[in-house]
Amino acid sequence: MTDKQLRLTIIDELDFEPSIEAAHIGVAVEDGVVTLTGHVQSYAEKIAAEKAVRRVKGVRAIAEEIEVRYPHDKKTSDTEIAQRALSIIAWDVTVPDAVKVKVEKGWVQLSGTVDWQYQRRAAENAIRKLSGVVGVSNLIELKQRASANDVKKAIEDALKRNAELEASTIRVTVGNDNRVTLDGKVHAWYERGVAERAAWSAPGVKSVDDHLLVA
């Protein structure tokens, strides 16, 4: 697929996604690397646009430069965002009370310590849907619960079980601090996300560095 064909395919995918105002998003492609520009009306829409592009076969990397622009009459104060964030965390049974929230100019910073990656991800997913949020920094840490060897085996087993991946082309390295590095090759961009989720599914993983290349 040429860059021109890939660009048209991406535009079609953005147009197909009902949660995105695709007319406000610019798409440029060079050697399979996609650059997204323009503006959207919410942080959730920004994330939706990036996810839509990741689904397209042939995308090798994404440079995301989309700006969140709220109408002036809908601008929400940092105090309101913080209060809403605390409320939604309190109501979400998957997010522990240990998660802390800081808001500055619409940008939300999450911190604290949780047991599992799904809790870390649930906190971010809940916050980024709030009105007024322009970005989220997820600094929530995970408690170390397993040895490096146990983590490595759990990840490799998860990769082998996944029908969307060729596990033999992926190499897993786990440091003593349970920080995971993925090397090797996958066939499509979205497979990198599949491999990352498999790595995060192992208990005790502190971080995942994805060095996988799209063949």
Image: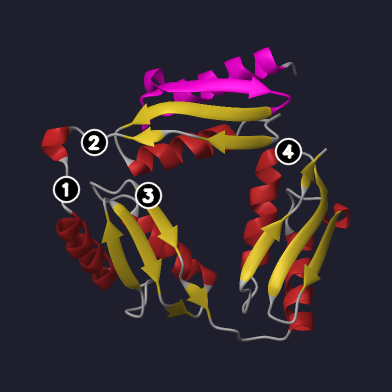
Say whether disc 2 or disc 4 marks the residue closer to the N-terminus.
2
Tell me the tag on residue 70: 2
For the residue carrying disc 1, how many other residues have a C-alpha within 10 Å: few (<14), some (14-19), or many (20+)? some
* Tags 1 and 2 touching, CB below 8 Å: yes
Q: Is residue 207 left or right of residue 16?
A: right
Tell me the tag on residue 135: 3
Q: Which residues are magenta?
A: 3-32
Say whether disc 3 or disc 1 marks the residue closer to the N-terminus.
1
**Percent of width and height locating residue 132:** 23, 46
* Tags 2 and 4 touching, CB below 8 Å: no
Say whether disc 1 or disc 2 marks the residue closer to the N-terminus.
2
State the quadrant of the N terminus: top right
Amino acid type of the residue tagged 3 in the rendering: Gly
Say whether disc 3 or disc 4 marks the residue closer to the N-terminus.
3
Say whether disc 3 or disc 2 marks the residue closer to the N-terminus.
2
Q: Which residue is mark 4?
A: 188
Say whether disc 1 or disc 4 marks the residue closer to the N-terminus.
1
Amino acid type of the residue tagged 2 in the rendering: Tyr
Marks 1 and 4, Cα distance to the nearest angstrom?
A: 39 Å
Q: Is residue 46 visible?
A: yes
Secondary-structure class at tag 2 = loop
Q: Is residue 109 left or right of residue 34?
A: left
Foreground label between 1 and 4:
1
**Percent of width and height locating residue 214:** 77, 40
Marks 3 and 1, Cα distance to the nearest angstrom?
A: 13 Å
Secondary-structure class at tag 1 = loop
Amino acid type of the residue tagged 4 in the rendering: Ala
Marks 1 and 2, Cα distance to the nearest angstrom?
A: 9 Å
Q: Which residue is mark 1?
A: 76
Q: Is residue 17 magenta?
A: yes
